[in-house]
Image (cartoon, rainbow, N blue to C red):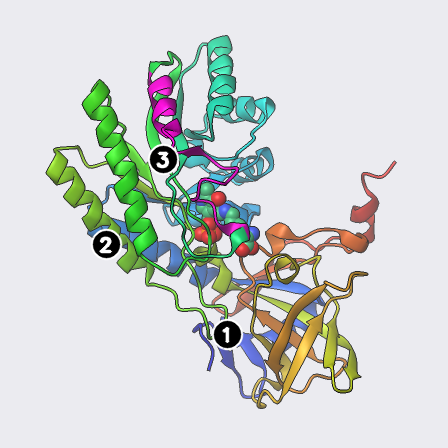
Amino acid sequence: MFYYKNLDINEKGNLTFNKADTVLLAKKYQTPLYVMDEDMIRENCRIYKKALDKFYDKRGLALYASKAFSCKEIYRIVASEGLGCDVVSGGELYTALEAGFDPEKIYFHGNNKTKQELIFALEKGVGHIVLDGFYDLEVISEICEEKNIVANVSVRIKPGIDAHTHDAVMTGQIDSKFGVALETGEAKEFLLTAIKKKNINLRGVHCHLGSQIFDLEPFEEAARRLLNLMIEIRNETGYIIEELNLGGGFGIKYTEKDDPIEYASYIESVSKTVKNICNRNDFPLPFILMEPGRSIVAPCGITLYTVGSVKKIPGIRTYVSVDGGMADNPRYALYNAEYEAVIANKAKEPKSQIVTIAGRCCESGDLIGENIKIQKAESGDIMAVLSTGAYNYSMASHYNRLPNPPVVMIKDGEDRVIVKGETYEDIVKNDI
Ligand code: LLP
């Protein structure tokens, strides 16, 4: 009935999430409310860790791509599961460090990092800086020279692969703001330049093809192309690039249409590809990194709302409005992202209506979804939108001065607040 095993229906007919009654949660904390499932987050971390250990002989590390959901508690959780993390801004880095994350296991990404951010990262001992291009290389070399230090770096390469995903989240192709291009020779030139820099220790190559990808093939092809480049560099200069980072992007099931691959099988096949190529070319097995974000947290989150106005426009559609919307979940407005929704207090009833779920912002595009099948919705009902654990809280805005909702974490049925909800005072606290 549900795609994920953390969802169920209790004897009252209410939707439960990791054993917690969602209707009671809505009552206790008010809505809108983000709810996360710690047990499933941990399980997902373990899937990656175990598969890397099993298929790649413990020579790999999964980095949680923290842009998917960033707050102190998630860094503590993934760290305790043995993962590293990827951050893309001073803010994410600061949060990770505040949570006690080991800086050695942090990879700092970004297509336009500021000099201040790079200084901050280096001063804090961040283990790896993923350079996005020649500009980054210049800035980091300058800082390292000034401070007389050496930085461990890798470079983001666009391998020229179309990963068949939404245009807005596709990043492996040549027309992308991220990285240096493989097919034009830019990537090779970058590596040759970086190797010669005195204060730079070139450790790895990286690519990220996009997000919500359902095929294995693009990942295998990316591994092949990057490895071939590593081998070419070795053949020409003798320099061994030790790390191969294949990014994130593993899809999850939001609706019936989505058919994700098993993450372990992805790791198995990529490991085989890498081992084969290395064998054939007498190249030392690289350390492998991957950067799952969505697949670690998306199914581990739901959002609870209260239904307000229900507006039937005869012959056109029914708008069911909730007390949140694009400010807490902008993904339909941005990508037409589809979600499943359930009336939590009527979870046992059949989904008898097709509706448009509207938010409360002054914006016609403020929708959570269209053509959504749901139980009969009436004002006062609690609506749960499913699989909102990734790119919802982290993409929330204050549009219309809506305070950000709290985040409640559930562990074995027990709830606790991990991010407090904002108040009106919070909204004006920086206003002069
Ligand atoms: N590594 C890098 C370098 C990335 O840029 C990303 C995502 C990831 C890893 C993690 O990808 P994931 O496993 O989560 O697919 N806001 C969009 C998604 C943007 C993804 C940005 N980069 C959305 O809501 O669909």
Spatial CA span between label 1 and label 2: 35 Å
Q: In which quarter of the image is the C terminus?
A: top right
In the picture of the structure, the residue carrying the numbered disc 3 is: 183
At a point 40% along the width and 16% down the height, the residue shown is: 150
Q: Where is residue 286 in the image (x, y as percent from the top left)?
A: 24, 36
Residue at disc 1, secondary structure: loop
Spatial CA span between label 3 and label 2: 24 Å
Label 3 CA crowd tier, 10 Å (few <14, some 14–19, many 20+): some
1 or 2: tag closer to the N-terminus: 1
Q: List the single residue furthest toward the right.
A: 432
Nearer to us: label 1 or label 2: 2
In the picture of the structure, the residue carrying the numbered disc 2 is: 269
Tell me the amino acid under the disc marked 3. Answer: Glu
Nearer to us: label 3 or label 2: 3
Residue at disc 2, secondary structure: helix
Residue range in magenta is 168-195
At a point 60% along the width and 70% down the height, the residue shown is: 385
Quarter holding residue 98: top right
Locate residue 87 relative to residue 432 in the image: left or right.
Answer: left
Mark number, residue 32:
none
Q: Nearer the viewer, residue 168 or 249?
A: 168
Mark number, residue 19:
1
Tell me the amino acid under the disc marked 1. Answer: Lys
Label 1 CA crowd tier, 10 Å (few <14, some 14–19, many 20+): some
3 or 1: tag closer to the N-terminus: 1
Quarter holding residue 41: bottom left
